[in-house]
Image (cartoon, rainbow, N blue to C red):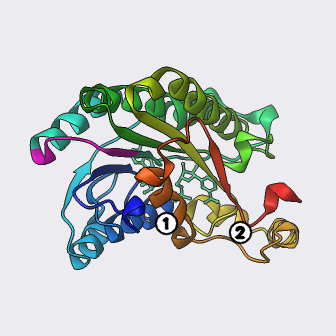
Amino acid sequence: MEIFDLTSKVAIVTGSSTGLGQGMSLGLAEAGADLVLVDIVDSKETAEKIKALGRKSLTVIADLSRMDAINDLVKKTLETFGKIDILINNAGIIRRTPAIDFTEKDWDDVMALNSKTVFFLSQAVARDMMKRKSGKIINIASLLSFSGGITVPSYSASKGAVAQITKALANEWAQYGLNINAIAPGYMITNNTANLRKDPERTKSISDRIPAGRWGTPDDLKGAAIFLASSASDYINGHVLLVDGGWMAR
Ligand code: NAD
């Protein structure tokens, strides 16, 4: 299965300490990649699991909602590994408040990390990828890249932007050998949905609509991440791949 092999590839995964970022980091490592794990908290557990798989990792603690974190991350990665083959823009936050009471801070915090950083980190990484005419950028979108959600207006706006950034960058950078695609996860069991899962009525109505009959887990994103990070997806550009147990088909 050489087309899925990531041996000697270097991947940056943001938001790598837990949840979907941890799951995708382990998936890439299982396929042979070395990892740069970036998070606002330590990605110690992920790093230990990667070591157990026989792969290398560099852990960077950074607040990716700040622009100055971006150049520093790219510099550290190039100093340690000399190149960047794969970037997964996964770090993201959500704030839940009815739109009528939504604050400017909750708008700005979510937009900064979930969409502004996705664009500018991609730009910084693409400058290295373009030199080698090769690179894979995978943005983590959402079902709310397609629909509006309830009480999460800045999250929906930010994830709509993720889908559009993915297409905009694919249009400009595919000619340089870069693939920019997105994964839109459905309802997944992580910290992101912890508050939602405390509401038994919403949990039941969501569960009832998922054709696969269950919520997703971080392991469910491994296959899509490996596919979009590997040469198997070399002619796929600007695609938003749903990994949602069939939710959007309903
Ligand atoms: P999570 O809250 O478990 O993980 C988010 C990660 O981002 C954490 O490791 C957190 O520490 C990190 N992070 C938060 N703020 C940061 C900052 N300022 N700088 C650096 N890192 C920061 O949630 P998750 O579900 O694993 O979310 C991962 C991505 O998947 C997010 O973009 C989220 O929007 C998206 N997503 C999740 C679901 C779901 O159902 N869980 C569905 C669709 C999309």
Q: Secondary structure at mark 2?
A: helix
Q: Which residue is mark 2?
A: 197
Q: Residue furthest front?
A: 2
Give the residue displayed 59% in from the left and 58% down from the top.
192
> Badge 2: how crowded within 10 Å, few (<14), some, or many (20+)?
some
Quadrant in which the C terminus appears: bottom right
Q: Could you tell me residue 137's position as x and y percent?
A: 43, 40
Q: Which residue is mark 1?
A: 222
Quarter of image, res 211: bottom right
Q: Which comes sooner in the sequence, label 2 or label 1?
A: 2
Q: Residue furthest left?
A: 79
Q: Is residue 58 magenta?
A: no
Q: How many marks?
A: 2
Query: Which residues are the magenta region?
Result: 80-87
Horizontal relation, residue 51 to residue 147: left or right: left
Report whether residue 221 is seen.
Answer: yes
